[in-house]
Image (spheres, helix red, strand yellow):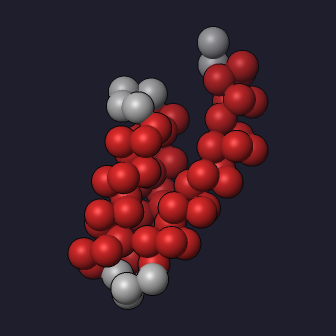
Amino acid sequence: MIDEAILWLGIVEIRANELDHPIVIDECIRLAKKFSNPNSYKFINAKLDEWLKTNQADWLKKNS
């Protein structure tokens, strides 16, 4: 459940476009390392990277 919350936090922050994407992902990784199981950060990193690759370009086009 904490992993899902961290993922949602990352996606919302990325979509807000207030911080650079690597900063958001790094913070999510730090949260996962602190509050979740030892390997969760790998999952969080992969899923946020995947989301960026598949959704960010489309979302930016719609909201520009």
> Could one spot residue 32 in this view of the protein?
yes
Which quarter of the rendering shows the C terminus?
A: top right
Image vertical order of residue 36 relative to residue 61, above or below: below
Residue located at (31% from left, 74% from top): 33
How far across and how far down the image is residue 22, in percent? Answer: 43, 42
How many marks overall? 0
Q: Looking at this rendering, what residue extends furthest in the bottom direction?
A: 37
Could you say where residue 52 lies in the image, as x and y percent from the top left?
Answer: 63, 43
Left or right relative to 42: residue 33: left
Asked whether 11 or 49 is in front, the reply is 49
* Residue at point 41%, 32% (across, down): 20
Q: Quadrant of residue 53?
A: top right
Residue at far top of view: 64
Residue drawn at (60%, 61%) of the image = 47
Q: Indicate whether 37 appears above or below 52.
A: below
Q: On the rendered structure, is 56 left or right of 58?
A: left
Q: Nearer the viewer, residue 3 or 34?
A: 34
